[in-house]
Image (cartoon, rainbow, N blue to C red):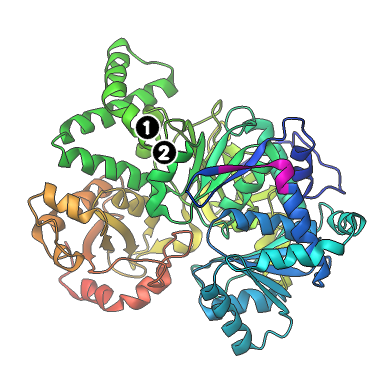
Amino acid sequence: MQEISVPAKVVSPPTMNTTEFVLRQAKLAANPALFSKRNADNVWIDVSAKEFLADVSAIAKGLIASGINVGDCVGIMARTRYEWSLVDFSIWFAGAVSVPIYETSSPSQVAWNLGDSGAVAVFAETGSHENIIRQAAHNEGLTALQHVWQLEGDGLDVLREAGADVSDETLEAARTANGLADVATIIYTSGTTGRPKGCMLTHSNFVELSENALAVLGQSVVPPGSQTIMFLPLAHVFARYISVLAVAGGAKVGHTPDIKNLLNDLQSFKPSFILAVPRVFEKVYNSASLKAEGEGKGKIFGLAAHTAIDYARAAQAGKVGIVLKAKHALFDKLVYSKLRAAMGGNVRHAVSGGGPLGERLGYFFQGIGLQILEGYGLTETTAPITVNRPERIKIGTVGAPLPGNAVKIADDGEILTQGVCVMKGYFGRDDLTAETFIDGWFRTGDIGELDEQGFLKITGRKKEIIVTSGGKNVVPALLEDQIRADAIVSQCVVIGEQRPFIAAIVTLDEEALPQWGKAHGLSSVITVAQAAKDPIVVAAVQKAVDRANGTVSAAEAIKQFRIVDTDFTENSGHLTPSMKVKRGQVLQDFNTVVEEIYLSKKPS
């Protein structure tokens, strides 16, 4: 199959915009809780739809009183927290356009987002964020920027007070000024290369994509009364879209800004579904495996993991034997139930995006009773183009298109898409917009294939395909994902562009290292720098490389690798906020390592 189009199940009126979701929930007699936030005693307190609507309206009136006009851009620079969503919807109620900024952004990055969008105001979480914003405004002469409101200061109270004299009629005029075709947000791509581009996502993108997703997921994954805890950055389109989807469906959202506290937060909040990037699921699996090894139960966990994978494969094929069913029931009591309890006990579904998960993890989590619904999308597509759903799932793929979306495979294998998910274009860059669309289809830059049932499989990034000096095309992600799944590995970058053979740069997982080292006869206080040269660690990474090599041809296999003594992080400049590797930056900063690999004796 080369093309599939799924008709929309819901068509929204052209005058509708994202704010209608809040009104819809507030009008219900049940007055459902849309959010939950922690009080001073760290206890979760629900925020009902009516309470949320009242506060959003008060802040929106304050924005109007402060001179924010329909169509103006307003930035948000904060960690994932309740107030992020509060001011996001307030901006929309005022008829304005929100511009997310990653809270880890440098002054130059902040200046670019605010300056390029022409933002007239910005919300800052802390005094530190406000200082960065004011520094950026001073350095770059951002004369359009008139207001900075601090979330942890009195910024919201100032706005509530300022809007006290704004009439309901004035607010309603601003709220209804935008329709489906109007821009709701400009999200700047975190960018693995070059300057970030401002993706103009419309109210149609959020409204119609949410409505059509609820049409197929609303009863099983996001029914009214379900709940999730948000820990991914809301500046990222994936988390942002799910937050809007939750309001549209009447689900409750909690927030946690620090992933280090995630385990405790999962247990206290008890979500029914979660969303994460593949690296989070890898960490959950690897942590459980290392914990079992440390307790002398490594063999039991290994058997349990194999059983979960076998059970899920058999269940997908519709043929679960009696013996396998009995083994699965036993391990459910011994292992799987404890893993589910560690995640709060109520999680039944998880949505995975931001990169390929891999069949092994997909089958494992399905086998332990946590169904991972892997999807695919980009900032330019408001997140999901395709997604697996409970009644129509194929592990190892990213699912079929959501209603209202279409997918086409170009002659060179590139994935093209069109539909309710696709952005209006790049802000102020008609040239880039024209380059990115071909005959009405958006060019994703990814390569993949459609099977006979319309399920999409991602095989790599078009621009990341490596062509060796011998002319062999190699998709690095196929190797990298498998190596990175090993407990001791943090990141892997496969190299070999116009080189005689394929190689890799590997980093170690600093968090996993102490427990892993202890289980393998090393000091529990071994450093990453020491471990990078340790024969036991090198041998373990070699095994991971060998396993990955077993899935590709000899010409595509990794012939050499080097373990570097530092990890790739967002702070080091080697990862985007959505945890994607900046390949070009890695190759530039580790050029000496790359050259050393290829100056060494050529492998036979």
Horizontally, residue 371 falls left or right of residue 129, namely left
**Label 1 crowd bin: few (<14), some (14–19), many (20+), radius 10 Å:** some
In magenta segment, residue 368: no
Q: Residue at x 38, y 44 (%)?
A: 263
The span shown in magenta is 45-52
**Label 2 crowd bin: few (<14), some (14–19), many (20+), radius 10 Å:** some
Q: Is residue 5 visible?
A: no
* Quadrant housing residue 113: bottom right
* Quadrant housing residue 22: top right
Give the label on residue 341, or none. Answer: 1
Tag 2: amino acid: Gln
In magenta segment, residue 47: yes
Q: In what element is the residue under mark 2?
A: helix
The total number of labels drawn is 2
- Residue 591 percent across, percent down from the top left: 31, 77
Whether 412 is drawn above or below 364: the answer is below
Q: Are marks 1 and 2 in contact (CB under 8 Å)?
A: yes
Horizontally, residue 572 falls left or right of residue 43, namely left
Q: In what element is the residue under mark 1?
A: helix
Residue at image mark 2: 267
Q: Quadrant of the N terminus?
A: top right
Q: Is residue 336 visible?
A: yes
- Residue 195 percent across, percent down from the top left: 57, 75
Whether 596 is drawn above or below 64: the answer is below
Residue at the outermost front position: 41
Q: Quadrant of the C terminus?
A: bottom left
| Front residue of 149 and 574 | 149
Specify which label sits upstream in the sequence, 1 or 2. 2
Could you tell me how far apart the alpha carbons at marks 1 and 2 are, in whole angstroms?
8 Å
